[in-house]
Image (cartoon, helix red, strand yellow):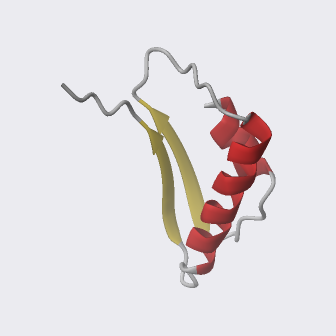
């Protein structure tokens, strides 16, 4: 969740957008280059907010995708 929170801190959020961060993970360990991932998420979040000119709810949800 730290990476999502840090990426959100790098962008400016319009006053008419509410941000919700949710997690259903019990283990939030992630083996990635955290700075690169923060940059990627910040760009995705920025693009998402730009696509919401009338405001609304932006939800960042992290979950595990378990495959067999």
Apparent side of residue 32 relative to residue 36 in the rendered image (left or right): left
Residue 20 image position (x, y, % from top left): 53, 48
Residue 31 image position (x, y, % from top left): 61, 25
Which residue is pictured at 48% across the width and 62% down the height?
A: 57
Apparent side of residue 64 relative to residue 62 in the rendered image (left or right): left
**Number of numbered tags placed on the structure image:** 0
Q: Which residue lies furthest to the top in this view?
A: 27
Which residue is pictured at 68% across the width and 31% down the height?
A: 2
Q: Between residue 29 and residue 53, name the one nearer to us.
A: 29
Q: Quadrant of the N terminus?
A: top right
Q: Can residue 7 be seen in this view?
A: yes
Q: Is residue 16 visible?
A: no
Q: Between residue 41 and residue 57, name the one nearer to us.
A: 41
Residue 51: quarter of image: bottom right
Q: Between residue 30 and residue 52, name the one nearer to us.
A: 30
Q: Between residue 10 and residue 37, name the one nearer to us.
A: 37
Which residue is pictured at 18% across the width and 25% down the height?
A: 68
Apparent side of residue 31 relative to residue 62 in the rendered image (left or right): right
Residue 46 image position (x, y, % from top left): 67, 68
* 30 w.r.t. 35: above or below: above
């Amino acid at each position: 969740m730290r990476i999502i929170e840090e990426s959100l801190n790098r962008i400016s959020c319009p006053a008419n957008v509410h941000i919700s961060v949710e997690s259903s993970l019990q283990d939030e360990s992630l083996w990635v280059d955290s700075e690169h991932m923060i940059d990627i998420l910040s760009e995705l979040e920025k693009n998402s907010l730009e696509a919401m000119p009338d405001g609304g709810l932006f939800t960042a949800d992290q979950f595990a995708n378990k495959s067999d």
